[in-house]
Amino acid sequence: MYEIKDVAQDLKAAVKRRRLLLILTPILFVIAAMVAVYFIEPKYESTTSILVQKDETLNPLVLYEIAVHIASEDRIQSLNEIIYSRSTIEILIDSLKLDSDVKSEADRQELIANTQNNISTRLRSTDAFEISFLDSNPERARNGAELLANHFINTKLLMESRRHEETVSFFSDKLSEIESIVSNQRDQSITITSDRMRDLPSDSDALQDRLQNIEGQLDAIEWRLLQEEEKLEALRSFQNETNIAQGINYLYKLPLSDMQFGDELNQLLNEYDNLRQQFTESYPRLRSLAEQIKQIADRMPPTLTTNIQRLNSQKQDLNAQKQRVVGDMQQFFVATQRASSQQSDFSIYEGLQAEMRVKLEQARMTRDIGMRAADQFIVLDPAIIPEKPASPNKTLILGIGLLLGVVLGIVASAVAEVMDTTVRGEADIPINKPIIAYITSG
């Protein structure tokens, strides 16, 4: 008990001697944390929430199973592909004027990467999602979140509008084809029809799977066509620009690494960009580089045109496959009806003709309803100007500074106490000898 009391007294005395160090160290660290918080640039985050209504909400025909079934991807599934695409980032940078300090292509690539990192998306449920944008300017953070949401909605509406128009065109062609069959093939024999039926799948599910697979490939080609058309439009804008220095800005928007002659053009653009910062446009090497850039840019549109033609050709082939699959489904339906009702070919094709007319009207109705498909996207929480920054976390930084100050103050006090050789009493004398006399301070 006596030793514990002595230890407590020694500890109390040590704290009293080192109280200045124990107090000043946390204070200094808290001050340093406050300075760090002051110099860290605050970031503001604005978020918008969007609800995508289900098809039956906008189109009541779905509830009664009389609407045309179109196998399409979920509207939310391609959210990240659209939001994080290079074309979307370019639109965001141009709209918010984030490239005012960009001086070279390397700076622009870094800006694009940083802008992508400032975007975040999150699915709240199966039919709702959030889009957030982080920026040092709170108003610009709000504008960025709104722009991303509007661009996503407009892109999805454009793709769905194309699909609806193609569906109407498809059913119109099929109706004309069936009308021709009804008028010209009335006397087709049962034997010929039975021979054709033997080559068809025995299950309509296989035909449905093939049809959905083809339509999925058509959606992918549509997206690639949009990208190739944007590249071609940028090149044509460059060719139509009389000022070469202004026209080169269109080339910076191109994903050159994915294009033919892109690496060569990228090298020339980097060299041109570096020389333009040092010399005027009349500098011989700059004029030579501008001419080389123009020559390479003139060689790229034919390649893009070829790619677009190739994609259109693939699209036509897939549409042809789609027509064949639908034709097989029609013939499968004919065979099923023949086996069950023993009707004549003419009456069966008449039934198909009537059904196809209904499908065509349904497709037109779906297309007309799709014109107000924007109503399916409901903004639950519009983007607002944030009042408080999302980062840095001042409370956390100050807390860490205080904790480090306390810990280091205790460690420094302990080290100072151990290294202190001052003799303050009999216990501090290491020699075990009797004390003869004391020297007073007086």
Image: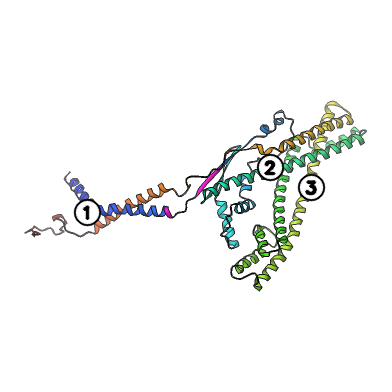
The image's mark for residue 187 is none
Dot 2 or dot 3: first in sequence order is 2
Q: Earlier in the sequence, mark 1 or mark 2?
A: 1
Q: Identify the residue at the far top of this view.
A: 341
Residue linked to disc 3: 316
> Could you tell me if residue 213 is visible in this image?
no
Quarter of the image where the C terminus is located:
bottom left
Toward the viewer: 194 or 435?
435
Residue extent of the magenta highlight: 38-47
Residue occupied by mark 1: 17
Q: Position of residue 259 (x, y in %)?
A: 69, 59
Residue neighbourhood size for the residue with mark 1, other residues' Cα within 10 Å, grouped as few (<14), some (14–19), many (≥20): few
At mark 2, the secondary structure is helix
- At mark 1, the secondary structure is helix
Q: Is 360 located above or below residue 42 in the figure?
A: above
Picture disc at residue 157: 2
In the rendered structure, which amino acid carries the disc numbered 3? Answer: Gln
The residue depicted at 71 percent of the width and 50 percent of the height is 226
Q: Are marks 1 and 3 in contact (CB under 8 Å)?
A: no
Secondary structure found at label 3: helix
Where's the N terminus, which quadrant?
Answer: top left
Q: Nearer the viewer, mark 1 or mark 2?
A: 2
- Whole-number angstrom distance, CA of label 2 to CA of label 3: 22 Å
Residue beneath the point at 88% across and 29% down = 347
